[in-house]
Amino acid sequence: MTAAKKNIWFFPVIVGILVIVSLLTPVASFNFMGALVANLWIWDLYIYDYGGVVVGTDFISEPMVMIPSLIATSLIAIGGVIGIVSGLLLRRSDNNRKLIVPSALMGILFIVGALIWFVLVPANFPMESYLGPPPFPGGTMDLWSLNYMGTSTSLHTMGFGLIGVFLAGILSFGCIGAAIYYSK
């Protein structure tokens, strides 16, 4: 128990590293039989390739997509830096309760940033600009699905970029519990 008590500082560092890795991986991926592959990052980068050859790299300039993406990225990156810095600064401290506030702040920043992206970006993403109009007359497309006559087909799948941020938010709140438990 004393080894765990002395090494609790490592927990927010791992959470911070997890969220930095999440920022470097796609949030959503589109794969049409391996021929057309598209990836979207939380910080607005959209890369698509055809047959393994990159045919387009864009930063989405649509303001209703760009602004929430940059806000979400900023909140998540700030939370990751807070995790790494607070863990390293408290490495030699015997008072694990000092990790409660930074961990709570990290968790809130991660969850709020991920929710901002998840709610605002897919609703405003200009699919027609990247994939063309819906292939069926009367069909509709958004980032996640193609809808036609009551049926829905998945377009993009959620990637580790968003899953990792939500996981980091949950682990941040777990860090609060560990700090309280090991400070007794």
Image (cartoon, grey):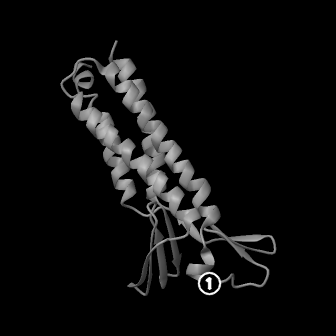
> How far across and how far down the image is residue 121, in percent?
58, 61
Image position of 159 (left or right of 124): left
Q: Is residue 169 above or below residue 165?
A: above
Q: Quadrant of residue 107?
A: top left
Depth check, front residue: 177 or 45: 45
- From the image, which quarter does the N terminus lie in? top left
> From this viewpoint, which residue is outermost toward the top?
184
> x, y (%) of residue 104?
44, 31
- At x 22% / y 23%, what residue is drawn? 6
* Image quarter (top left, top right, bottom left or bottom right) of the C terminus: top left
Q: Residue at x 21, y 28 (%)?
A: 91
Residue 175 location, x and y as percent? 39, 30
Residue ID at (39%, 61%): 25
Assign a secondary structure to mark 1.
loop
Residue under the image location 27 percent in, 30 percent down:
9
Tell me if mark 1 has few (under 14), some (14-19) or many (20+) residues whose alpha carbon lies within 10 angstroms of its own: few
**Residue located farthest toward the left when viewing the structure as drawn:** 92
Q: At which x and y percent is residue 95?
A: 27, 17
**Which sits in the foreground, 82 or 144?**
82
Count of numbered marks: 1
The amino acid on which the numbered mark 1 sits, given as a three-letter code, is: Gly
Q: Which residue is mark 1?
A: 132
User: Horizontally, is 144 left or right of 99 in the view?
Assistant: right
Relative to 156, does residue 84 appear above or below in the rendering? above
Q: Is residue 80 left or right of residue 30?
A: left
